[in-house]
Image (spheres, rainbow, N blue to C red):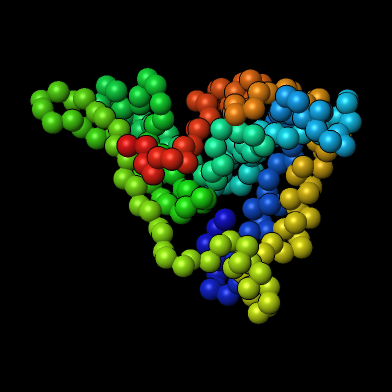
Amino acid sequence: MEPPPGRDFGAVHNEKAKVFQAIRPMTSKDLVRGQYLDYRKEPDVAKNSDVETFCALRLFIDSWRWEAVPWYIRAGKYLPETVTEVLVELKSPPQRLFADSTPKTGLANYLRFRLSPSSAVAIAARVKLPGREFVGDQRELYLSDQEPGEELPYERLLGDAMVGDDALFTREDAVEAAWTVVEPVLKNHHRVRPYKRKSWGPKQSDALIASDGGWHNPDSKDASRS
């Protein structure tokens, strides 16, 4: 979102709503729905169920700041990890000081925000190795934010609701704008694709993001990927 003109929560909600209003409505090409194997054998599940247990999607925000920048979201049940992360991959500079400024494998420079199960921020940059040759290596600086006795997310939300603080809640117009984005694919979509338990979803989700380098698979056991 753009910087709000003031520090009050109303100004923040206004800018958040503008982001949802600028998101381009989705098409079936922007969506991959998955269903883990044996889901239809679960109690009270229809044998021909088309209910998704996995979703991968691509969004575009039609604003000056985010023009032509794709946003990918992936979530599902029975994935290898239970982690919530946001990864912002940076573009390579037009003039390359190092021959290997962009690694042949792996990610380019990036910012990584871990939201759960713990809070952390990481920045990865390609730095020159010691010596005469201009050879780089990617290093990650990782900052963990863990406070003893910190409230769990739902504890904080319930507490805020009781005292009437709506800072962390989404306003009605933003919710309606978000529904407008997904409404075209609620009925017009492909059938679910099967995937194995403890995998990262159906292979079709990899094709969705292939042109932009592939998914980042988080690891809940490793605090840092350096």
Find residue 112 and report its horizontal and vertical position in percent.
44, 44
* Residue 35 shows up from this direction: yes
Report the residue at 60% width, 29% height from top: 198
Find residue 85 and report its horizontal and vertical position in percent.
52, 44
Report the residue at 82% width, 42% height from top: 183
Q: How many marks?
A: 0
Give the farthest residue toward the front: 43
- Please state if 204 lies on the left or on the right of 108 as rendered: right
Find residue 43 and report its horizontal and vertical position in percent.
84, 36
Find residue 101 and report its horizontal and vertical position in percent.
31, 27
Give the farthest residue toward the left: 132
Q: Nearer the viewer, residue 81 or 215?
A: 81
- On screen, 202 above or below 155? above
Report the residue at 75% width, 44% height from top: 181
- Please state if 105 lies on the left or on the right of 4 as rendered: left
- On screen, 92 above or below 202? below
* Quarter of the image where the N terminus is located: bottom right
Residue 106's quadrant in the figure?
A: top left
Residue 154's quadrant in the figure?
A: bottom right
* Residue 188 shows up from this direction: no
* Quarter of the image where the C terminus is located: top left
- Please state if 221 lies on the left or on the right of 42 as rendered: left
Report the residue at 41% width, 30% height from top: 107
- On screen, 19 above or below 151? above
